[in-house]
Image (tube, coloured by chain):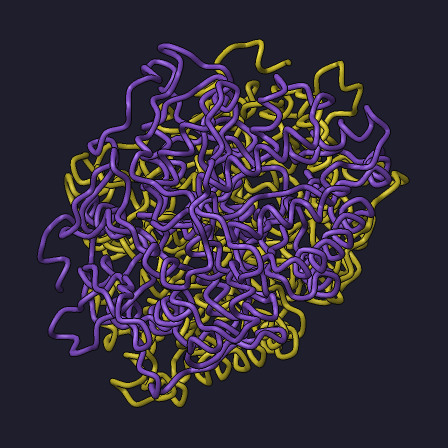
Chain colours: A yellow, B purple
Amino acid sequence: MNIQTKPDIARKNPSRAPATGDVTVGPRAGGRKVYDTGERFADLRVPFHQIDLHPSANEAPVVVYDPSGPYTDPAATIDIARGLPDVRSAWIARRGDADAVAVPRVVRPEDNGGATGEMLAPEFDNSRRTILRGRAGRPVTQLEYARAGIVTEEMEYIAIRENLRRAKDAQVMRDGEDFGASVPDFVTPEFVRDEVARGRAVIPANINHPEVEPMIIGRNFLVKINANIGNSAVLSHVADEVDKMVWATRWGADTVMDLSTGRNIHNIRDWIVRNAPVPIGTVPIYQALEKVDGIAEDLTWDVFRDTLIEQAEQGVDYFTIHAGVRLPFVPLTANRVTGIVSRGGSIMAKWCLAHHRESFLYEHFAEICEIMRAYDVTFSLGDGLRPGSIADANDDAQFAELRTLGELTQVAWDHGCQVMIEGPGHVPMHKIKANMDEQLKHCGEAPFYTLGPLTTDIAPGYDHITSAIGAAMIGWFGTAMLCYVTPKEHLGLPDRDDVKTGVITYKLAAHAADLAKGHPSARLHDDAISRARFEFRWEDQFNLGLDPETARCFHDETLPKEAHKTA
Amino acid sequence: MNIQTKPDIARKNPSRAPATGDVTVGPRAGGRKVYDTGERFADLRVPFHQIDLHPSANEAPVVVYDPSGPYTDPAATIDIARGLPDVRSAWIARRGDADAVAVPRVVRPEDNGGATGEMLAPEFDNSRRTILRGRAGRPVTQLEYARAGIVTEEMEYIAIRENLRRAKDAQVMRDGEDFGASVPDFVTPEFVRDEVARGRAVIPANINHPEVEPMIIGRNFLVKINANIGNSAVLSHVADEVDKMVWATRWGADTVMDLSTGRNIHNIRDWIVRNAPVPIGTVPIYQALEKVDGIAEDLTWDVFRDTLIEQAEQGVDYFTIHAGVRLPFVPLTANRVTGIVSRGGSIMAKWCLAHHRESFLYEHFAEICEIMRAYDVTFSLGDGLRPGSIADANDDAQFAELRTLGELTQVAWDHGCQVMIEGPGHVPMHKIKANMDEQLKHCGEAPFYTLGPLTTDIAPGYDHITSAIGAAMIGWFGTAMLCYVTPKEHLGLPDRDDVKTGVITYKLAAHAADLAKGHPSARLHDDAISRARFEFRWEDQFNLGLDPETARCFHDETLPKEAHKTA
């Protein structure tokens, strides 16, 4: 997936610490933040964005999912230097299944690419943190709790969150084609538990990321979206990455991947994780590569293992692991039009070919599982051989890897780890469904997490749209999370505007998927905005839209008079 | 469909005549204009946009469809005051089936909404025009020629155009799912004739629009797109509408609908048609309504009939006729969330209810056919009861009208008229295919022409994207032409940037549909850009994209060095 940062970063001083003024705070337009508490657990505070309608409508408020965290709560105090308030530590403590790590891993110069002096990004102050690790012989992952029949705080939180304040006995409208999914009318904590237990959903929530507001990724829940951020080798500034993370969640990103490369990876990630209300994903091989000066052949299991522990202790919630790029599959890409386009995939292919050995990720997979289980880091099994063009879609290389990911899913599950599976990429419309069908067939219904897919290659500059078409379709077919693509895909590094455009484009694609699946809450939102439209309640129409400011601005460009908004 | 114009028009003087400097001329970025001639007809000059690749690629040029007309030919002289050069008059003359109208209809003040003085848009100088009408007892429509086994100049032109300079014996790649379409490997003039003869394709080409470069709309040809332009009651300037028409075709609009309302409708349309290289569509009921001062109840068959003749003599190539909005169907919309959202549909519903009478369009349909046949104006049977929200998709009102459109298609065919059928609108993904299936079932395979459909209602400001998802899908399923939606949909009047965004969004959706159908030329374009991407031939990648300037600009924002484009 792409490496992203802002164009003006190079002009800034990387050694300046991010400040609270660097991020966007304040209520989201059009509604207000509200919270619900749990029935089992009184210390849950589940957020929603509630949109109250004009009194003339005589309608109940519309409640939408809100991943934006405390930043959009006017009552919250934001302090980037301290990080977000703790959500989960009390829960983890009372479960009593994790211990403080006696000797946490010490940060080394290579963790930040050897940056020093002015080139070194400032450290986050971790003096208040305790680093946890699961106690031997006890459950630590949400999967292990679920299998043991335990409803965790995270599970009740998620059940409340997914229902969007609908009453348990509210009438629901089930109008959709779900291709065999089992979306319930009302989500109970037990349903969450059962879906997690059978591996059909994941709750990415590292025990070292207590700031996260729990969320779930699974075919029988609302479709989620991910936004990629991260600095690159040539451009780097911590504050911009924290800003983009906050900005992405403000518009609706459910998880954020930090795909930083180059220097300062460790310190940047610290700032991001400590300030992230959503799960953070990474691709550890990127940092491992930096530790061996960018030479793929020099990668070793030890360097990789060290990186996993480093990032798990920091609190990363899910890792992309390209363990399906096996030595025998690399030749299958020889006749492709675009070879291997996944960065992680090409690193591992290079390593395999240079040593003519099986991938160390594949060979050490059980050890990777043990490490990730100990912190409840969720697997995102990477599709290193995903197609990079329409021409290469659904080819032998891609599907050979997918079958291997299915095999690895079983291994990870045997170790108690949560797993999701990454998918393409570039796929013409008529080949999209086969991707979902093959994934369901081979990967035991583990959640699918796709990048688009782009449905044509001919529109650089508009790939958020070429890919939204594929994303909406594959979301409908059963994909649980859609990784956004921005207008800068294939061309350059997305800026803040691109992040917003990508997130909103994917929010609408995910919602279109929920609608087509017949998700019981999806139509409520569409119907409310349609009624507002029909009754010329312009303010309600703006407020109910994904981007109220833009809608209002477009309207006012041609019909600026206030009267036009109520007539 | 929506009424569109520029925001700053009111500040301009409507009585200024458009000048050549008002429109964008010059080569399209990335390639050059080339022409081919016919085998049967030596006076054909079929345009293409040819993209030559970097010599290092050692590849044939990529040829793409080019609806932009002489404006993008550096060798052409453009003079808006004279109109475009004549393409078809010699063909029409040598067929000898049309006569000059002895007494053409005289322009009346009400044709321009009674505008006078400074408020009257200037007249186009029609002194050089001869107005034609089909001779009694002779074929005049392309359908009639086709049924008589005659290959017209238009048909050979189209056959050449659709093949995009591929050799007849070139190997083709047929990888797609076409749902029963019959796209040939190579389009012959006879194939064009046969598809037109059976009503499965239309060639919108009024004999009074000799400037048009012939094109075809049908399920077995490349998917086409339409762009809507037009002034509105509050904003009006001729030059801006001519500019938007030229601008839309520059980016790839295959037809343009002039949806003008308010004053000056006649004169604006004259300027547009005389300068349009693509077929122009209109909704005659809009102008008829202006002639009765906007009071739907005052509409009469005589006023409508007069408007049809007025516009047919001007050279409009297709008319949207909402003859399927029958009196008994209006009550079916009573319980809808968004009632009747089609402007033409609501005008006719209002008329039917006010008089409690069957629609005069339905009752006089045979006479409408006689008029349209005489000039070869193609029917676009309007979906006046299309859903305006997800809630109303595929309801009884919509499908009752669709069945009536099927019945009217047979009547129009019996009169020798070409017909296409308009479709929605707002439809969630799981209900899109039923629209195509029902249309195929009831409308005898007449080409389907849909607006989007939007797949969710919750993203005002982004409806070009919510609708591109639906458009790509329904194009794949068999829709022949996709009417664009711009970011301003539901909110305001699109400006020039919105027109461009809408057109490019729909070009990529139409191409995604061609790809998924397995159109034999579609993959060539994708594969060429993918190879360029893989080989870091940046200039080729930009040039092969739908919008080379934007792609280059996005690239240069972060990696401006020339070296980055070849490395």
Residue A314 appears in the rendering: no
Q: Position of residue B354 (x, y in %)?
A: 81, 23
Residue at the spot x=46%, y=69% of the render? Answer: B515
Q: Position of residue A129 (x, y in %)?
A: 46, 40
Q: Which quadrant is the N terminus of chain A positioned in?
A: bottom left
Q: Nearer the viewer, residue B447 or A286?
A: B447
Instruction: Tell whether B56 sits left or right of B411.
Output: left
Q: Nearer the viewer, residue B17 or B111?
A: B111
Q: Which quadrant is the C terminus of chain A positioned in?
A: top right
Q: Is residue B122 above or below residue B172?
A: above
Q: Say which quarter of the image contains residue B240.
A: top left
Q: Nearer the viewer, residue B314 or A427?
A: B314
Residue at the spot x=44%, y=62% of the render? Answer: B511
Q: Position of residue B332 (x, y in %)?
A: 85, 39
Instruction: Give the residue at the far front of this rendering.
Output: B102
Instruction: Tell whether B259 sits left or right of B406.
Output: left
Residue A177 appears in the rendering: yes
Q: Is residue B241 above or below residue A436?
A: above
Number of labels in the image equals: 0
Instruction: Give the residue at the far right of this rendering.
Output: A169
Residue at the spot x=36%, y=83% of the render? Answer: A333
Instruction: Tell whether B427 sits left or right of B43.
Output: right
Q: Position of residue A495 (x, y in %)?
A: 32, 40
Q: Say which quarter of the image contains residue B154.
A: bottom left
